[in-house]
Structures are given as C-alpha cells and as structure tokens.
Image (cartoon, rainbow, N blue to C red):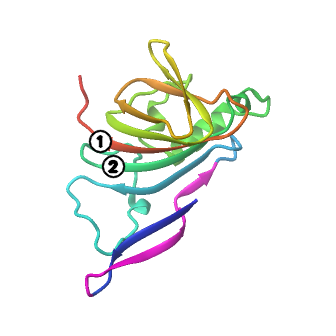
Amino acid sequence: MRRVVTGHDEDGRSVVVSDGPVPRSREFTSLPGWVSRLPWATEPGVPVSRTGEDPTPKVVSLLPAAGGTRFIVLTFPPEAAMADPAFDPVAFDVEQRGDSPGIAELIEPDGMHATPTVDYGIVLQGEIVLELDDGNRTPLAAGDIVIQNGTRHAWRNRSGQPVTMAFVLIGAEADH
C-alpha cells in the first residue's frame, strides 16, 4: 500500500513531502494474512502540519481521544484461518496488544467490541459480515460504507479470500 503525504515548501506552495509505503504497517506472524496499517493520525487541538510531518510514530493508542482521529487499514484473512490447528490465540492477542493498543484491550474473545468513536468504514476489497450485538448480520462488499456510532460489533470474514477495509476513527465522548 502506498501513502502520499502533502505539505508546504518554504514559500508556502503545496508539495508532496513523502511518497512510499505506509511506515507503520504490520503483517502478523501469529495469524498470516492479518495486516494492520496506520497511515495517519491527528490529536485533538493540534493544528494541521504544514510540513507534512508523519505523526504515526508518536501514536501510543489507536483509540483516539475525543476530537482526535485514526486512519487504519486492516486486511482480515478468512475466518477459517482461526480454526487452523496451528493458530495460537494467545500469540495473536499479544501481537494485537502490541500493534493496536487502546483498541485491542476492548476486543472480547469472540471479536465483539465497542469504542467511544464514530467510525467511517469502507470495504476496499472482498466481502465481510458486520455482526451487531443483537445478532444482526449485514453482508458488505467492496465499495460498501459503514458508519459505526460507538456500537458493539464484530467483523466476520466468512469468505475464502482476504478482505481489506479502511477505517477513519473519530474520537467522541462516550454515551453513558
């Protein structure tokens, strides 16, 4: 995946300041086919960077504070990969917590989770099922868009192919 970042030169003109792979990417060893990428992030109250400086190395939580954002691209392997006898759920949990702090701790053993965010999700490639806590299962395909409003949910890749989704998480106040 390629990331192009713009900024401004010393004269204030728009320029491309970086063009290359997403630096903060991880291909999981505990679950082949699971790929996590953090192309960009913003923090509340921090002005737009005129230089296009990469904020991702400083991100300590993938769960944005209210007013902050995270742009995350995930590739989900087929769900059958988790049924493989070689799959080690403990190793996967350790890798998740290292890669996705702030969110990984919220994921339940069955994959269900909720975050205090509004999430814009776009299926880039493949087919996936959005499962809600009421048991509702909504199939989604490439080009479909999901708006998650802090709801408890899980993603189920029941197809035989990888699925890639892009998510923009916008930190919001929790609705208690």
Q: Is residue 65 above or below residue 82?
A: below
Q: Can you say whether 126 is above or below 174 in the image?
A: below
Would you say residue 126 sits in the magenta stretch?
no
Front-lying residue, 44 or 86: 44
Residue sitting farthest toward the top: 134
Dividing the picture into quadrants, the one containing residue 30 is top right
Quarter-of-image position of residue 173: top left
Extent of the magenta region: 11-27
**Residue at image location 67% in from the left, 29% down from the top:** 79
Q: Residues within 10 Å of mark 1 (few under 14, many from 20)?
A: many
Q: Position of residue 141 (x, y in %)?
A: 57, 34
- Which residue: 64% across, 33% down? 90
Amino acid type at mark 2: Thr
Which label number is shown at residue 171? 1
Image coordinates for residue 70, horizontal then vertical, percent:
38, 49
State the residue position of label 2: 69
Kindly indicate whether the residue at mark 2 contacts the one at mark 1 (C-beta within 8 angstroms).
yes
Asked whether 167 or 141 is in front, the reply is: 141
Front residue (pair 136, 89) = 136
